[in-house]
Image (cartoon, rainbow, N blue to C red):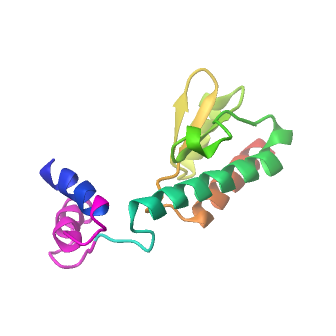
Amino acid sequence: MQWGRRIVRAWEEGWMELPIEIGDRLGAAVLGAAPGQVVVGDSTTGIERIRAKGIALTEFAIELADERLAELGVSVASPRDPARRGAHVALAYPDARRLCRQLIERGVIVDFRGPDVIRFGLSPLPTRFLDVWDAVAATEELLS
């Protein structure tokens, strides 16, 4: 994946190279878009800002889980220290496999990690804070 290595290098160099070229490749492959219709970029551009958004998303998810899901039997299984976690949040629940399937049926992107963990991947570029809110709300609704 030469373009993948080049996009990472572009981020490290301040995201000044390749947004249109990479956008054309991703746009055609993922969206079926014509050349010039997709430009890869984001208001969080810059690796430090991307990491900061990842931390903010996961902190928000953990806060919501503590406030809205703890009383329903869900506990945060991810490290609380942002320096010790990536841009995902793991939630433990006794019947995590079933809950994971139900969330997927509702369009929430999660994966199951045995024996009792649901992992929410919060990739900083495409994930909005509203997406986190909606995922926690769907979880809460399924458990209520």
Residue occupying image coordinates x 57% and y 51%: 106
Is residue 70 covered in magenta?
Answer: no
Query: Which of these two is toward me, 127 or 98?
Result: 127
Query: Which of these two is toward me, 137 or 57?
Result: 57
Query: Which of these two is toward me, 110 or 50?
Result: 50
The residue positioned farthest toward the top in the image shown: 115
The residue positioned farthest toward the front in the image shown: 13
Q: Is residue 104 rendered to the left or right of residue 81?
A: left
User: In the figure, 8 relative to 90: above or below?
Assistant: below
User: In the figure, 49 relative to 71: above or below?
Assistant: below
Residue 22 position by quadrant: bottom left
Residue 76, percent from left and from top: 71, 37
Query: Which of these two is toward me, 21 or 116?
Result: 21
Residue 95, percent from left and from top: 69, 27
Question: Which residues, given as a range, are shown in magenta?
Answer: 12-39
Residue occupying image coordinates x 60% and y 64%: 129
Residue 8, percent from left and from top: 27, 55
The residue positioned farthest toward the right in the image shown: 71
Residue occupying image coordinates x 72% and y 26%: 94
Residue 73, percent from left and from top: 80, 34
Residue 101 position by quadrant: top right
- Which quarter of the rendering shows the C terminus? top right
Is residue 25 covered in magenta?
Answer: yes
Residue occupying image coordinates x 50% and y 61%: 127
Q: Is residue 49 rendered to the left or right of residue 140?
A: left
Q: How many marks?
A: 0
